Amino acid sequence: MTDLGGGPEGRPEGRRGTGAAGRLRAELAGAVRGEVSFGATARALTTMDASNYRRVPLGVVAPRDADDVAAALAVCRAHGVPVVARGGGTSIAGQATGTGVVLDFTRHMNRILALDPETRTAVVQPGAVLDRLQEAAAPHGLRFGPDPSTHGRCTLGGMIGNNSCGSHSVAWGTTADNVRELTVVGAAGDARRLGRDWRGAPDGLRALVESELALLRTGFPELPRRISGYALDALLPERGADTARAFCGSEGTWGLLTEAVVSLVEAPRARALAVLAYPDESAAADAAAGLLGHGPLTVEGMAADLVPADAGLPRGGAWLFVETGGGSPAEARAHADTIVRAADVRDALVVTDPAGQRALWRLREDAAGTATRMPYAGDGSPPGTGRGLGAEAWPGWEDCAVPPARLGAYLRDFRALLADHGLRGTPYGHFGDGCIHVRIDFDLVSAAGVARFRRFSEEVARLVVSHGGSLSGEHGDGQARAELLPAMYGAEMVRLFERAKDLWDPDGLLNPGMLVRPHRLDQNLRFAVLPKRPVDVEFGYPADGGDFSAAVRRCVGVAKCRTASAPGGAEVMCPSFRATGEEAHSTRGRARLLHEMLAGEIVTDGWRSTEVRDALDLCLSCKGCRSDCPVGVDMATYKAEFLHHHYAGRRRPAAHYALGRLPFWLAAVARTRSARLVNSLASLRPLAAAAKRLAGVAPGREIPRLAPETFGRWWSARLRERAYARERGADGPFPGSGGKTVLLWPDTFTEHLEPSVGRAAVRVLEAAGLTVLLPPETPWRHGPVGDGVTRSPLRLGPLLPRRRRRVCCGLTYVSTGQLDRARAVLRRTLDLLEPCFAVDGLPVVVLEPSCAAALRTDLPELLPGDPRAARLAAAVTTFAEALEQHAPGWTPPRVDRPATGQTHCHQHAVLGDGAERRLREAAGLTGTLAGGCCGLAGNFGFERGHEEVSRACAEEQLLPAVRAAGEGAVVLADGYSCRTQLAQLSGRRGRHLAEVLAEALDDVPRDGRFPATP
C-alpha cells in the first residue's frame, strides 16, 4: 500500500491511498475522456503557481467536460487523493498547487458558451481566459468588469476561485459582484447550481448560518476589498442568501466549478488617463480616496522604484493613474481634466491617445514581475551576494487591503515595519480601493531568512487588522495568509469557516491546506529544493551573480509568456507557446522544468534530462523573454547552457553539425570557390533530399543558394580597383575616406548568402560621409588594418601568404549549445580585432540583428573575464544607429512608400529599434512593422520536426501583414532568417533597410550592384 499524502498538524489530506499511483492513473484514464498524465513533465509543470510555494502532484488530468470532472473526482475520492483545480496558474498565495491530482481546465474547458447582449450576461467555462471574454463582448459595447493585470492569461474559474478584482474595481466591483449563477461538482460528485435563496447549498449550511447570524453580521470588516476568509456574510437573509456569491473566493475548497453565468457591464466609448504626480507613495495614497467622488474608472498607484526613467511620466516620486470614461473623447478628456483640477498634485499629464494609454498601463501590469527584481541597494554587489538574495523580491505579503481613507497612514506604518526588519519592498496597486501589492526581498533560502519571513508576516498581519483591513485584498489567502486568519477574524469565526468547509467537503479532499486547517506559511517553500551552492555553468549570468539557480528562479510564474497573442502586436514572447498552446512550450513552463531539474526530485537526470530537452526543443531562441518577461528570464541563454551540458561527450543531432557549424562549412565553400557547384547539386532534387536528410533539415525546406561572389571578395576587388585608380593619378581624396571611420562587420549571412546587403550598406554609409573598413583576417603586428587584405591600398607586402580567418559572432554555435566552440571562435575574433581596439571609439556596424545581439550579450557573458569582450560589445551598433550617431547631419534619400514586414525578434529584445524607426520616418517609409517572430529563427525553422511550429509563428503576424500590404509596399526584414522565411512561405522578397536606401540613391543601378570606382 502506498501512502498518497498527509496534511498539516496531523490532519490527513484525505484518507490514506488504497492503491499505488499507477493504479490511480489507470483508473483515471479509464474514467475520463480527457488527457491523464502522471509523467515527469506534466507533474513538474504544475508544482508551482505564481507564489513562493511548491508541491509535487501525483498527476494531472485535463477534463473535457463536467462529466469528466465528476468522474475524476469519484476516482480520487475512492483513493482518498486530494484534488486541486487549476486555471492559468497565476495564483500568488499557493492555492493552485497540491500533492494529489491537479485538474487543468485550460486545455479543453476553456470556451465562451454563450453571450447575450440583451441581458448582459455570458456563460463561460472555468478555463476560459478573461481576454477571450472581453474580445467576445467588445463588439456589443460590453465587457466583464474585473480585470486583473494578468488578464491575458488568467481564467474565469481562477478569478471566481480567488474573487479577483483588478484595476477597475472602483467602478465595477469584484468578481463576486459580477457573478449570477455557478454550476459546480460537489465533493460527492453531484452537480449543483448555485444562486440566490440558498440555491445549490449543501445540507446543513442554512442551519449553520441561521445559528450564527449575530457573528456573521458583526464579524466582517466593511471595506471594498475584503477577500480573506469565506464570504459567509453573502448567505445572510438580507443579502439574498446567495450561494454563488459566497462560493466566490473559496479557492476550490468547496466544489469544482464547471460553468458560470457572469454579468457584463457597458464599456465606455472613450477613455482618458490622468497621470497625477506626488512626492511619494504616501502622499499619493492620501489623495486617492478623495478622488473617488468624481466617479473614476480606476485609481491606481505606483512609485518611482517600478518606473523606468524614460517612461515619460510627469515629475514626481509616485503617481496615480486615474482613468475616466465618457461617451466621446472630449467627454472623457473633460472628466479627466476635472480630476486634475481637483487633485493637489505636483504635476499632471492627461493621455487620450489609446496607444499612449496602453503603454502606460503596461508599466502598471508588468509591476508584479518588475517588482521581483529591485535595484540593488548597498555596496553595488550583484544580486545573490552580500545580503541573502540581494535584489530578488518575492510575494508573501502581496495584496492586503485597508479602508481607502486609511491607506496613507497604513503605508507609513508598513514602511516603518519593513525598516525594523531590514527589508525592502515597493508598494503599488489599487490605491482607490485601499489595496496594496508589494514584493519584498525576503531571504527564503536560509533558516534565519525564513524565520524573519514568518515574524514579519505575523507582525504585518496585526498591523493590517489595526487599520481595519483584510489580509487579502485580491489574490486570496491560500497558504500565504490562511494561517494568519485568526488575527483578522478571531478563533470563533475561523471555527465557523471550518464547519462550513466540512459541509461542502466532508472528506477534506478539495484543495486541503487552503483557507482552513492551513499549511504553515513557511512550509513548502519552492526555494528549499534548489542547490545550496552555485551550479557549474558556462555563461557568466552577470545579473544573477553568476548563479544559474538564481537565473532560473527569476521566473515567478506571472505567466505573461502564456498570452494567446502579442499585446498590441508589439511583443515577441512566447512564439512557441502561441503556436502550440502547451505549457511546456512557454517560457514559464521551461523555467519550471529547469527548476525541477535542479531540484532533482521529479526530473532526476540532471543535465541529461530528456524532459527538459524536449521542452526546449521548440524554443526558437528568439530572446523575446529577455525583454518582454517582466523579470527578464532569458530562455535562449538557458537553452544554450542546457544543450552544452546535455550533449557534452555525446553525439549531437545532425542539425547541430550541419547548421550549428554553418560558418565553418560556408567558409570551406568560399575557400574552394565551389558555390556554383554546390548550388547546382542542391538544385537536383534527389541529391537535395539526401543532403537534407543527412543534415537533419526539414524535407519541405529549400536549401538557400550561396552567393557566387562573397561580400569579402567584392570588397577586396572594389578596394583594389580604387587603389589602382588612385595610383593612375585620380584627383581628390581616396574614395570613401575622410569622414568618421566605422568597422563594418561581415557576418556569415551577408558574407556568403546575401552580399547585396553588405554592398548596399557600404554604399549608404559612404554616401553619408563615413569611412568604411572591414575587420582584418590575420592578426597584425603593426597597428590597425584597413580592409583585411592589405595594410594600405598602396602596399602589397602584407599580401605574403598567411592563414586567413574571419571574425564571427559565434551565433550558430551558441544557439545549438556548442559553447566551447563558440568561446574559441569569439577569442579568435577578439585576437583579430586587437589592432582595431587601438582606434579610440571605432564603432562596429553589424547588419544582421541576431549577430549584433550575440555580440552585445552572448560575447561578454561567455567571456566575462576578457576586457576586450566588453569593449567590443559596447562598440556594436546597428546600421541605423551608426547613421544616427556618426552621420547626424546626413539626410537619407526619400523613398516615400508604405512599408510592411517585421522587426527582428533579437532587435526588439536586445538592440531596440528606435533608430530604425526614425530612419524609416526620415526616408518616408510609412507604416508600422509587425512584431512577433518570423518562426525561422536561424537554424530552428530548418530543423526536422520544427516546420509546423515555424510556419505557425510566421502566420501569427508576419505573413498576414505582408499579405495585407499593397503591391507598392516595401517589405522590410533586416534579418536573413526573416527574409528567407518570407521568400519560402509567401514568395515575397524582403529587403534590408540598407538595400532600400541604397536603391533610392540616384547613382545606384536597380540591380543593386555598384561600380568598382565611383
Image (cartoon, rainbow, N blue to C red):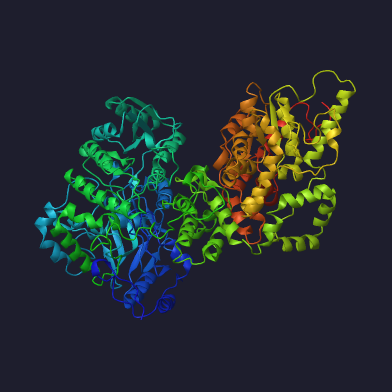
Q: How many marks?
A: 0
Asked if residue 161 can be seen in this view, the reply is yes
Question: Please, is residue 884 above or below residue 931 in the view?
Answer: above
- Residue drawn where x is 60% and y is 33% of the image: 916
Quadrant of the rendered structure where residue 493 is?
bottom left
**Looking at the image, can residue 472 be seen?**
no
**Frontmost residue, 476 versus 652:** 652
Relative to 337, residue 433 above or below: below
Residue 78, by quadrant, is bottom left
Q: Nearer the viewer, residue 1009 or 135?
A: 1009
Residue 308 x/y as whole percent: 44, 35
x then y, percent, for residue 475: 31, 52
Q: Is residue 843 above or below residue 583?
A: above
Residue 77, above or below 891: below
Q: In screen coordinates, is 461 left or right of 161?
A: left
Which corner quadrant holds the N terminus? Answer: bottom left
Q: Residue at x 82, y 32 (%)?
A: 718
User: In terms of depth relative to the viewer, which is nearer, 441 or 971?
Assistant: 441
Work out which quarter of the rendered image holds the C terminus and state it. Answer: top right
**Image coordinates for residue 751, horizontal then vertical, percent:** 75, 42
Question: On the picture, is 32 further left or further right than 195?
Answer: right
Q: Residue furthest right?
A: 728
Residue 819 x, y percent position in the rendering: 62, 52
Residue drawn at x 50%, y 60% is 584
Q: Quadrant of residue 912?
A: top right
Pick out the residue farthest to the top: 731
In this view of the protein, which residue sits in the foreground, 547 or 508?
A: 547
Left or right of 987 in this view: 464: left
